[in-house]
Amino acid sequence: MSTLYRRLLDLMPRIGVQVTDLGPGKAVVSRRGGPYRVTGAGKDTWVLRPTGDAARSEAAEDEAVRLGDSGAVLLMDPSARRDERGTQLAAAAYLCTQHVAAMLELYGVNCVFDVGANTGQYAKGLRRAGYTGRIVSFEPTSATFARLAKAAEDDPQWQVHRCGLGREESTARIHTGWKTMNSLLPASEYGKGRYSRFAKDDTEEIRVRRLDEVMDEALAGLADPRPYLKMDTQGYDLEVFGGAGERIAEFVGMQSEVAVLKLYEGSPGMGEAVARYEAAGFGITGMYPVTREATTGRVIEFDCVLMRAAAAPTV
């Protein structure tokens, strides 16, 4: 039986690509832009690279790392090996999205509450990972919300709301100009030392609502709601969580950015936040570093994924 690699090579001439077979695991393919080299990294695995001198020298140094017995292969080029921190954080972001998508499928989630949506990066990541259910995004600042609304306009299963969420219904002033890190909390001394963006201190008045007050609207039309709560509110996650009241029991899972080193004054530490989530019936299924100090290697924040085991489907 031919391998997937071999079947790919057999298919290429049908789409106008010339193939010169050089032996097991090696071939030269060409089309308009010049020749490319296919190198085998193992059974049914291949890499397609330009055959220029620079590319050839780097490709020769690539390392194919097998990920246990999963059948997956990670290809590490020299630049990735040199940037350990960047590679680890990128891998963590990818693994977190894949894990969340798997949990949404396992628990039958049909509505994701995307709190602190920014311009829609999280929602778009879920779509790329295969989640097709409802997404309800919350973003309070005017300029960022405009970009969020634009991102969601062609997705009928993606709702957007211009407001923040917290423990009480109110209006508040949010710190803006911090790119993806706008917060209702001021920056800590540690945060100011780490991020120069915190030196800018513009604010905008926003509406703050309670989570339990928006749930009926968000879940309307779902015969058997199975919601999941994602929070990324720059130190304000426990306030959002508190605003769910007793209705937090309706969520089958959740995700929160928890801080090891505090970027914002008055924000909870990781231990306090996780203890609150566990007391409400959630258990950790994954922890993924979001940011790390380049000089010390210390993790600053984790994405913490938690699910309600009692809500898991029974076989």
Image (cartoon, helix red, strand yellow):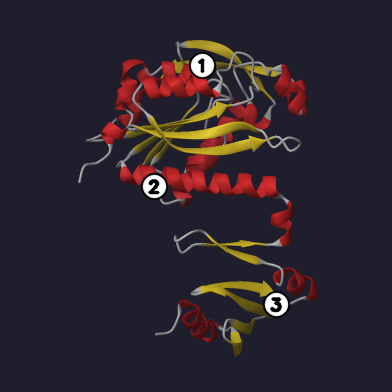
Within 10 Å of disc 2 (Cα), the crowding (few <14, some 14-19, many 20+) is some
Q: Secondary structure at mark 2?
A: helix
Q: Residue at x 66, y 72 (%)?
A: 49
Give the quarter of the image for residue 2.
bottom left
Query: Closer to us: mark 1 or mark 3?
Result: 3
Write down the residue under mark 1.
207
Residue 163 is situated, as x and y percent measured from the top left of the image, at 50, 22
Q: Quadrant of the N terminus?
A: bottom left
Q: Amino acid at mark 1?
A: Arg
Residue 122 is situated, as x and y percent measured from the top left of the image, at 51, 40
**47 or 63, nearer to the observer:** 63
Q: Amino acid at mark 2?
A: Ala
Within 10 Å of disc 3 (Cα), the crowding (few <14, some 14-19, many 20+) is few
**Left or right, 179 with reference to 223:** right
Q: Residue at x 63, y 22 (%)?
A: 262
Q: Residue at x 65, y 19 (%)?
A: 175
Which numbered tag is attached to residue 33? 3
From this viewpoint, is residue 237 visible? no
Q: Secondary structure at mark 1?
A: strand
Do the CB atoms of the residues marked 1 and 3 lie less than 8 Å apart?
no
Q: Earlier in the sequence, mark 1 or mark 3?
A: 3
Q: Residue furthest right?
A: 53
Write down the residue under mark 2.
102
**32 or 270, nearer to the observer:** 270
**Left or right, 157 with reference to 123:** left
Q: Residue furthest left?
A: 315
Give the quarter of the image for residue 30.
bottom right
Q: Residue at x 33, y 39 (%)?
A: 109
Q: Amino acid at mark 3?
A: Gly
Query: Closer to us: mark 3 or mark 2?
Result: 2
Is residue 298 depicted above or below 281 in this figure? Answer: below
